[in-house]
Amino acid sequence: MNNTPKKLLVTGGAGYIGSVCAARLVESGYEVVVLDDLSTGHADAVPDGCRFVEGDAAETAASLLAEGFDGVLHFAAKSLVGESMQYPAKYWNGNVLVSLQLLEAMRKHGTPRLVFSSTAAVYGQPDEVPIAESAPTRPTNTYGATKLAIDHAITSYAAAHGLAAASLRYFNVAGAYGRFGERHTTETHLIPIVLQVPAGDRQQVQIYGDDYPTEDGTCVRDYIHVTDLADAHLLALEHTTPGAHRIYNLGNGTGFSNKHVVDTCRAVTGHPIPAVTADRRGGDPAVLVASSERARTELGWKPERANLDDMVADAWAFTQSRQPA
Ligand code: UDP
C-alpha cells in the first residue's frame, strides 16, 4: 500500500508563506492546486507548475475537494493583529467560520490530511521562554484567539473522524525564496518595514519601546527563514497519522532584539537606516522565543538558514528585485 500523499490543495498559496510552500511542494514532486481569493495574495506569486483556482477556502474549496485530494495545507487567513482587534467579525468569520467549512468539506469528501498554519500568538504573554507546545494558551488578541479556536476544531475532527492533522505555530517568519517574498499592502512586520528605508519608501523606522527587560531594552523575537518553515510543512504532512493532531512550534530557538534586527539590516544593505524610539506597541510581549524540540525530534526538522543575516539578505534581494528599474 502506498500512503504517500500526492495531490494537495494549498489554500492561500498566492500569499507569502503559502507561495513558498507551494513552490517547495512542486519541486518535491507533488501535484499542487493553489486556491486563493487574492484578497491579500498575488496571482503572479502562484508558483509555476501549480494549477491555480481563484476562490475562497470554504465553498470553492468544497467543490474542489470533490475531485479527490490526499491533503490540504491551509494557509488562507486574515493575519493582522491590529485589524483583528478593530474588526473581530472579519477574523471570526474569515478564519474560524471558513476553516470549519473547510474541515466539514474535507470530512465529506474523505480528504485524509491537513496541515494548518497556526501562530505563536495563541500563547499570549508566556510564563517562560523558550515556549514549548505544552505552554498555556492565552491569546491576547483576536487573531490568536481565532487560530486557537481552529486548532481546537482540528483536534476534535482528528478524534472523531480520523483526520491526520498537524498545526504549525509560527514565530517570526522572514526571508524570501527567489521571486516569492513578503509584499503586503498593509505592512506591519519589522524586517519589511525596516527595508522600506533603503528601498526609498520610508524615511526612518520607529522602534516600539526601548524599556523592556531585555539586554538592550527592545523586544526580542525568534526569526525563522521562510524556506525552513516551508520544509517543516512538508515534513509535518508526511508524518501525519490518522486520528492524531500534532502541534509543532516553529522558530530557531534564538532571539534577536529589534535593535539587532535594524543593525543587521544596516549591515546587509549598507544604508544608515535612521531609527527613532517610539512608544511601546500595545500587547507586545518582551521576549518570544520558540522551543522547536518537538519538530526536531518528531519530524527530523532542522533549520538550514537560521542566520539572521541570511534572512535579511534574502528579503533585501527580493525587495530590490521588485523595484522599478
Ligand atoms: N516593531 C517595531 N517597529 C515597527 C514594526 C515592529 O519596533 O515598525 C517591533 C514590534 O513592536 C515587535 C517586533 O518589532 O517588538 C516584531 O514585530 P512584528 O510585527 O514584526 O512581529 P510580531 O512579533 O508582533 O509577530
Image: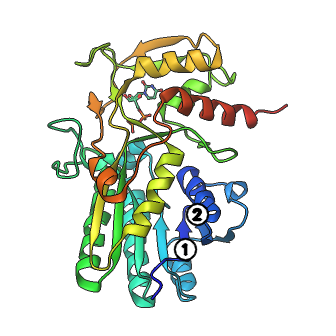
Residue sitting at x 67%, y 54%: 42
In this picture, residue 319 sits left or right of residue 235:
right
Q: Nearer the viewer, residue 55 or 251?
A: 251
Q: Residue at x 68, y 32 (%)?
A: 317
Relative image position of residue 264 (x, y in whole percent) = 52, 19
Dot 2: what SS?
Answer: helix
Give the numbered dot on residue 25. Answer: 2
- Quarter of the image holding residue 38? bottom right
Q: Residue at x 36, y 58 (%)?
A: 299
- Please tell me whether mark 1 sits on a helix, a strand or a loop: strand
Residues at discs 2 and 1 in contact (Cβ within 8 Å):
yes
Camera-side residue of 203 and 148? 148
Q: Which residue is mark 1?
A: 8
Nearer the observer, 34 or 90: 34
From what the image shows, is residue 144 above or below residue 71?
Answer: above
Assess disc 2: are there few (<14), some (14-19) or many (≥20) residues with their C-alpha within 10 Å of its C-alpha.
many
Q: Nearer the viewer, mark 2 or mark 1?
A: 2
How are the colours assigned in the image? rainbow
Which is more toward the observer, 161 or 188? 161
